[in-house]
Each structure stands twice: as C-alpha cells, then as structure tokens.
Image (cartoon, rainbow, N blue to C red):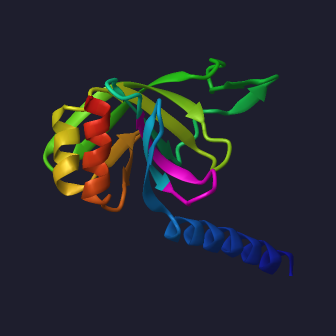
Amino acid sequence: MTRLLSLLAALSLIAGSAQAQDQRVWRLYNGPDQVTLVYGVPDTDDVAQVLMCAPGHRIQAHFTFEHEVAVRLDGDRWLDARGRAAPWPARLSLASGAAAATLDATTMPDQMNGGSTVSATFAPGGPVMTAFARSGRLRASAYGETVTLPPAPLARVRRFLALCAR
C-alpha cells in the first residue's frame, strides 16, 4: 500500500509538471526601463527561460536546467559540493539553427523548480540572435543538458531584439 501511495504521489507530481509545461507560452513585456521576452506560465513564477535588456544594452539570458549545482544551504548561502557559495561559474551554449555561441555564465539554484538557473550576457546583434529572429527557435546547453524551447512568435522576437538594439 505504501508503494502504491508513493507511486501515485510521484505520478501526480509528473502530471502537474507536464500540465504546467503545457501552459507555458512566449510573452513580451515592454516596460519603460526593461524589455523582457519570457517563456513560462502567464501570471506565475513558473518561467523556463527569460531574455531581458534595458533598451540599448546587452541581453541577459536566464535558462533553467534540471542539473543541481547547489547541495546545501548554509545560513542564507547556497553551497556546491566543494563548499563554494553561489553564484558559480558556468558555460552556456546558445544555438539557433547553425548559429552557435558558448558564453561565460553564472549558475544559481532554482528554488522553485529545482535544478539550476544559468545566466549569461551578450550583444543583441550576434549570429545566434540573428538566427533566432529568422526562425524563432532557440536551444541552450549547460552541464551536459540541452533545453530546446518551442518556437517563439517571430514578431515578438524581432520586436524584442529591435528594442534591445536601440
């Protein structure tokens, strides 16, 4: 009976996670000081990917991966297996079609979804973002894991990149 309850609980979590992922959509927010292109569940903190910039500045990208770098909490600081406090250095590979770039990045624990959020900053006019504007497709890789997002609406991608490039 205990095994059955554990299995049902696990299936419930999987179904809930899959349902949340089914509700994720691309959204564009254009505020006075920041432009944000988000892939997540509207009106929640459930976000899989965020691209943001202040108009005329570099893009900040944040991707969620299942890989967990954080192993324990020491007071208010997350530590990795070596005892180093977050944020941790990382490498983030971004690709769209044949265009690819590997960037210096940082990693923080993703306390909502588990896993880690890997973040990097880059120029809006590079080859990967140019290809993203043509296809709406974007892949991110870190820690041996690749996240392939559903295509973003091209009008939103192009508007985001135009506002960032101002």
Q: Quadrant of residue 11?
A: bottom right
Residue plotted at (65% across, 70% down): 16
Percent coordinates x, y for residue 62 in the rendering: 46, 38
Q: Closer to the camera, 22 or 145?
A: 22
Q: Closer to the camera, 98 or 39?
A: 39
Q: Is residue 4 left or right of residue 34?
A: right
In the rendered view, would you say 22 is above or below 106?
below
Residue plotted at (23% across, 33% down): 101
Residue 95 forms part of the magenta stretch: no
- Residue that lies at the very extreme toward the front in this rendered image: 32
Q: Quadrant of the C terminus?
A: top left
Total numbered circles:
0
In the rendered view, would you say 57 is above or below 161?
above
Q: Closer to the camera, 144 or 97?
A: 97
Q: Is residue 104 left or right of residue 108?
A: left
Residue 50 forms part of the magenta stretch: yes
In the rendered view, would you say 41 is above or below 115?
below
Q: Is residue 41 left or right of residue 121?
A: right
In the rendered view, would you say 84 is above or below 32?
above
Span of residues in magenta: 40-52
Percent coordinates x, y for residue 23 in the rendering: 53, 68
Residue plotted at (55% across, 60% down): 41
